[in-house]
Image (tube, grey):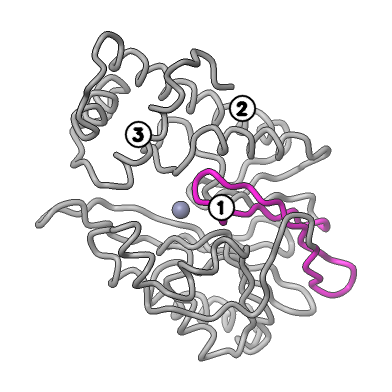
Amino acid sequence: MQVTEHIHALKIPFKLRVGPAKTVDRFVFAYLIFGDQICLIDCGIAGSEAIILDYIKQAGRDPREITRLVFTHSHPDHIGAGQALKKQTGCKIAAHIDAKPWIENVDQQYAERPIGNFFNLVGGSVEIDSELKDGDQVGLGDGKTLEIYHTPGHSKGSISLFYNKDKALFTGDAVPKAGSVPIYEDVATSITSIKKLKQIKGLEILIASWDDPQFGASVYPSMDAGLQWFQQIHEAVLAETAGSDALDAEDLSARVLKRLEFPEIPLVPIVVTSIGAHLKLLDQQQLI
Ligand SMILES: [Zn+2]
């Protein structure tokens, strides 16, 4: 799908295992920026290299023109095809310095953040060629740049990228879609990150990994909707913890999801972690 003259979106479906015999259907977007060079932002799960390389060939370009693959963060659905793409195209890989350990050592990531079918989603560890930090500029040739904003919360090494040519902001998983399953490490940091992105003036396109691009008048309201969603989750946690001080984390998560009117979903550790992130903020009614 073409987003602008230069930006193309590839929607990549995958299955996330949430129980011994149960999977849920998910998807993630990988983005291509076509210019003098080709830049890839995230690359989907293991095996997605075929989809990406086919798309590039069909556009009449050569996969070896991919000069850079930038990861918004280290999670499997964003880095899964990284090792294969680097091998096949020789592209250089960039990511935030705090995302580096889990990208370069996926066994460590799995040990610290277990996901059912992790090793089906990730093709393997891959080495980072350039470590990014807040304020860095990545040159794409011909005056086009990606400006890096460190936006932790969903993960500590999450970044957002501002593409100057189209006034487009790639946010990875930093701005949640309202109503989506809670997946973050630190809710207060997530909120600070979104507020920081709202300060960027003149944005024309917001491009998240789990949603269709938002254009024009929808850009800032969709960031506000993400903030409101954090507040709504927080209020559900406050309601479920009121008067009971020793709730089991899984039990609390199940109650919160029910209060938020999610259909019965199996509780995976990454969701329990997210709900648990609210527990240190129980003295605050208002998070946003
Ligand atoms: Zn993620």
Mark 1 Cβ inside 8 Å of ligand 1: yes
Question: Vertical placement of 144 versus 285: above or below?
Answer: below
Q: Tag 2's secondary structure?
A: helix
Question: Vertical placement of 253 versus 241: above or below?
Answer: below
**Between 68 and 244, the one nearer to me in the picture:** 244
Question: Vertical placement of 232 versus 29: above or below?
Answer: above
Q: Tag 3's secondary structure?
A: helix
Q: Amino acid at mark 3?
A: Gly
Q: Residue drawn at (53%, 23%), measured in percent from left and top? A: 228
Q: Which residue is mark 3?
A: 276
Q: Tag 1's secondary structure?
A: strand
Q: Amino acid at mark 1?
A: Gly
**Between 251 and 75, the one nearer to me in the picture:** 251
* Residue interval drawn in magenta: 137-165
Number of numbered discs on residues: 3
Marking on residue 224: 2
The outermost residue toward the front is 246
Residue contact between numbered discs 2 and 3, judged by CB atoms under 8 Å: no
**Label 3 Cα neighbours within 10 Å, binned few <14 / some 14-19 / many ≥20:** many
From the top left corner, tell me how far across and down residue 114 is, in percent: 29, 58
From the top left corner, tell me how far across and down residue 226 is, in percent: 54, 32
Q: Residue drawn at (62%, 65%), measured in percent from left and top? A: 97
Q: Amino acid at mark 2?
A: Asp
Q: Which residue is mark 1?
A: 172
**Between 46 and 270, the one nearer to me in the picture:** 270
Q: Residue drawn at (48%, 49%), measured in percent from left and top? A: 210
